[in-house]
Image (spheres, rainbow, N blue to C red):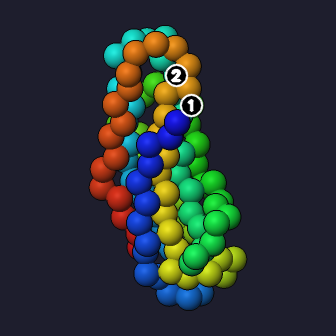
Amino acid sequence: SYTYLTTTVFTPMYGTVEVSFYFKVDCEDFSAVSEFTFAVAGNNSSTQSQKYKRTGNSKSWDQVSRTINLNAIATPIEIYFYAQTTAGSGNCLYYLDDVKVY
């Protein structure tokens, strides 16, 4: 099952915004396989648009930056970060830092 964070971001109604963040996955067993996903949804929408997905382990910090087209979704937008261990044994720790919307 997924662990997730979500937040609502008040943005202009039209145009684009940039979403950037750093993340790291630290699994105690090298055989563990993790999944980290970033998605957005429009205001009160149950449909999400996946913007980034990474499978595997990452002992170092990775930076991700994505442009969100506000003309295609209702504002304010909701941002979702999902994390889960999909295979292997042991636990994985998921770190998220320095999330910016500009």
Say which residue appears at 49% left-offset and 46% top-offset.
82
Q: Where residue 55 is drawn, which disc sits there?
A: 1
The residue where tag 2 is placed is 33
Q: Where residue 34 is drawn, which disc sits there?
A: none
Disc 2 marks a residue whose amino acid type is Val
The residue lying toward the viewer, choosing from 2 and 9, is 2
What SS does tag 2 mark? strand
What SS does tag 1 mark? strand
Q: Are marks 2 and 1 in contact (CB under 8 Å)?
A: yes
- Left or right of 92, for residue 34: right
Say which residue appears at 44% left-offset and 49% top-offset.
4
User: Taking the image as drawn, is residue 59 in sight?
Assistant: no
Give the alpha-carbon distance from disc 2 to disc 1, as whole Å: 7 Å
Image coords of residue 77 (percent x, y): 52, 74
Image coords of residue 85 (percent x, y): 49, 28
**Splitting the image into 4 quarters, where does residue 45 fall?**
bottom right
Vertical order, 69 against 52 (above or below) = below
Vertical order, 30 against 98 (above or below) = above
Say which residue appears at 48% left-offset and 63% top-offset.
79
Image coords of residue 1 (percent x, y): 52, 36
Q: Residue furthest front?
A: 1
- Left or right of 50, for residue 64: left
The residue lying toward the viewer, choosing from 52 and 87, is 87
Disc 1 marks a residue whose amino acid type is Thr
Quadrant of image for the C terminus: bottom left
Vertical order, 1 against 17 (above or below) = above
Q: Residue furthest bottom?
A: 13
- Left or right of 81, for residue 51: right
